[in-house]
Image: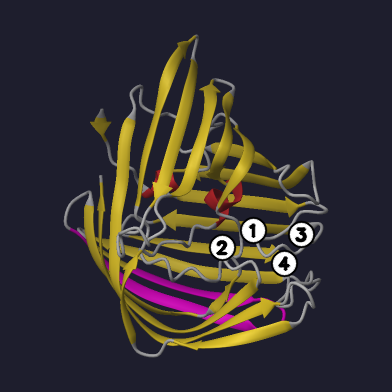
Amino acid sequence: MNKKLITLAVAGAMVAPLAAAADTTLYGRIHTSLQYVDGDVLNVFRDPITGAITTQSVNADSTWDVRNETTRIGVKGSEDLGNGLKAIFQAEWAFNSAEGGSTAGGLANRLAYAGLTGGWGTAAIGRQWTPYYGAVDKADIFNGGSFNNQYVGTFRTGNAVAYVTPNFGGFVGKAALVMDAGDPNNNNVDAYNLSAQYDNGPISVGIGYHNTVDGATNDGGVTYSDVKGWGIGGSYNFGMFKVIAQYEDWDRLDLTGVKNTDGWSEYTLAGEMYMGKHTFKAMWGNLDYGADDDDNWAIGYQYSLSKRTRVYTEYGEPTGVQQDNTNANQIASLQDGKIWNIGLRHDF
């Protein structure tokens, strides 16, 4: 079994191994940081019986913590079936490099799919990156996972059947259907996720669309219908530096869990400067979620010790709203504060 490096570009694709190696590849990442937080979090909850909204303020002033970032391990590969056809697969799990032990939650499934690829394109089934994420979220450039709060789109999804077109001179289209019979409110297609992307030399431009159809539920068990979102992202690499911009417009649940007809929107400007082994990063974004709008900014420095190992420091004020929570009654987390990270990442 050969060990090979997984790159950030691979992580940003919906079905990563479109040209996977003929053998099986073991890969992974150990990524941990020392984080200082000075700020507050306001958690919003709904009572499952009465529907009443309550809030809980969490003061996080002046705390230090060893934080797991994007640690994972995975395996991917392909089998040549002849006549230009290949079977492909990828399975990837996250685990905690900061805590460890039996209380750390064990392995969490990030990706798990199999598919077929040939001259006609690629089809895959299972848990995958969404087409929308790879096309739109181009400003997700920081090592620390705390600095992308303005992004409102999708990341990975399970129960997906996906298709990727062949590459037509830099243009690639992607589509995914999400179907989960375990959702008692909807026994058919739960969501559509589409994208179109053009990559040619220094230019990368993508547009994505998502539609959660009638009867689907969010992580908090709230039923909603016809929640749509679209976004566009682009970057241009000048060689010594890269400039990035993206915009999103979504119908999302408001902070009471009711469909927000005013919608959510965000726009982000970001950039990187390359000087040998040194990379400097900056980002500014704005999230408007109807009830309020928040600015989100960060700066960072990264030093590449090798192609596989980097150290970095990052600082920012990632204010914003998060809605992906393990507590079924928690519908939002409003974050406001200052964060400083010092981290080490090694890919294998």
Could you tell me which residue is drawn at 49 percent across and 14 percent down?
A: 84
Report the Cα–Cα distance between label 4 and label 3. Answer: 6 Å
The residue mark sitting in front, 4 or 1, is 4
Mark toward the start of the polypeptide (2 vs 3) = 3
Amino acid carrying mark 4 in the image: Arg
Residue 252 disc label: 4
Q: Which residue is mark 2?
A: 246
Which amino acid type corresponds to the residue marked 3 in the rendered image?
Val
Sequence-earlier tag: 4 or 1 = 1
Bounds of the magenta segment: 281-304
Disc 4/disc 1 C-alpha distance (Å) = 14 Å
> Pointer 2: residues within 10 angstroms few (<14), some, or many (20+)?
many
In contact (CB < 8 Å): disc 3 and disc 1: no
Q: Earlier in the sequence, mark 4 or mark 3?
A: 3
Q: Is residue 52 visible?
A: yes
Question: What kind of secondary structure does the magenta stretch mostly adopt?
Answer: strand
Q: CA distance from mark 2 to mark 4?
A: 18 Å
Q: Which mark is residue 227?
A: 3
Residue 231, labelled with which disc?
1
Residue at image location 41% in from the left, 76% down from the top: 298
Badge 1: how crowded within 10 Å, few (<14), some, or many (20+)? many
Please state if 289 lies on the left or on the right of 186 as rendered.
left
Quarter that holds the N terminus: top left
**Residue 243, how many percent across, how many down?**
44, 63
**Disc 4, disc 1: CB below 8 Å?**
no
Q: Is residue 248 left or right of residue 75?
A: right
Q: Secondary structure at mark 3?
A: strand
Mark 4, other Cα within 10 Å: few <14 / some 14–19 / many ≥20: many
